Amino acid sequence: MRLFAALLPPPEALDELAGALAPHRDDWPELRWLARDNWHLTLSFFGEVPDRALPDLSVRLARAASRHPPVTLSFTGAGAFPSARRGRVLWYGLSGPVARLTKLAASLAAGARRAGATQVDEKPFRPHLSVARARAEVDVRPLVSALAAFEGMRWDAPDVHLVRSHLGARVRYETVESWPLGGTTRGGG
């Protein structure tokens, strides 16, 4: 299974983001806008994880989540990877206890490696929510500038979700299991 750990923002926060993007979408046909129901904050990407590793992965991720308190975040501004001049991924940024998110992401990645996930992404954690992609580099500086002043509502992130990617013509994500930050296990959907 192709898996990652994520935070899932509440619908109200996602509605705000969608509303801020709406006036700009038609002006950027070179961007492929990601489906709103797939929006999430990736904490750690694990890649293909063998089924036999899932029980240990579940235990280790639950333990990692229990060691970190819930966080209150808000979306702010926008940016692009690798840069706004050569954008391939358009994203919204975050404000809040980002250093705590970085520690949580590192704990989850370490737990996944110990559980046998061999494709754990080693890139430095940069908290963001991706909203669009481009096949070729696009100068999105005007769009990033237009979205720079965005300040979203504050929202709580009480849970870490283990999410499975279903690849295909339309990517779909499925929560396999979730754990409260600082708490106990919950079943997936």
Image (cartoon, grey):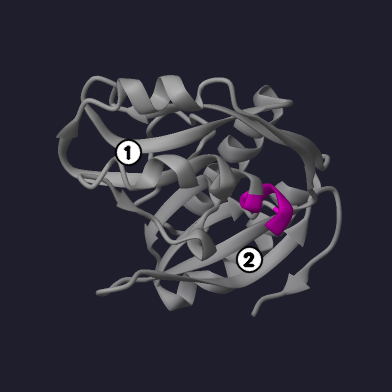
Q: Secondary structure at mark 1?
A: strand
**Which residue is rendered at x = 66% and y = 38% of the image?**
104
Q: Is residue 133 left or right of residue 16?
A: left
Please give left or right for residue 185 compared with residue 42 in the image: right
Q: Are marks 1 and 2 in contact (CB under 8 Å)?
A: no
Q: Amino acid at mark 1?
A: Val
In the rendered image, the residue lying farthest to the right is 183
Disc 1 to disc 2, C-alpha distance? 30 Å
The reply to whether residue 68 is in sight is no
Point out the stretch of residues depicted in magenta: 10-15
Q: Residues within 10 Å of mark 2 (few under 14, many from 20)?
A: many
**Residue 52's x, y, as percent?**
46, 76
Asked if the stretch drawn in magenta spans residue 13, the answer is: yes
Write the residue at 55% across / 40% down: 20
The one of 182 and 23 positioned closer to us in this rendering: 23
Q: Mark 2: which secondary structure?
A: helix
Q: In terms of image quadrants, where is residue 141? A: top left
For residue 89, the mark is 1
Badge 1, how many Cα within 10 Å: few under 14, some, many 20+?
Answer: many
Residue 163, position as x, y percentages in the image: 53, 65
Q: Is residue 105 left or right of residue 81?
A: right
Main SS of the magenta segment?
helix
Tag nearer the camera, 1 or 2: 1
Q: Quadrant of the C terminus?
A: bottom right
Note whether 97 is above or below 1 in the view shown.
above
Instruction: Report the quarter where the N terminus lies.
Output: bottom left
Amino acid type, residue under disc 2 in the picture = Ser
Residue 104 at least partly seen: yes
Q: Which mark identifies residue 75?
A: none
Q: Residue at x 37, y 28 (%)?
A: 143
Q: Horizontal placement of 29 versus 51: left or right?
A: left
Residue behind mark 2? 58
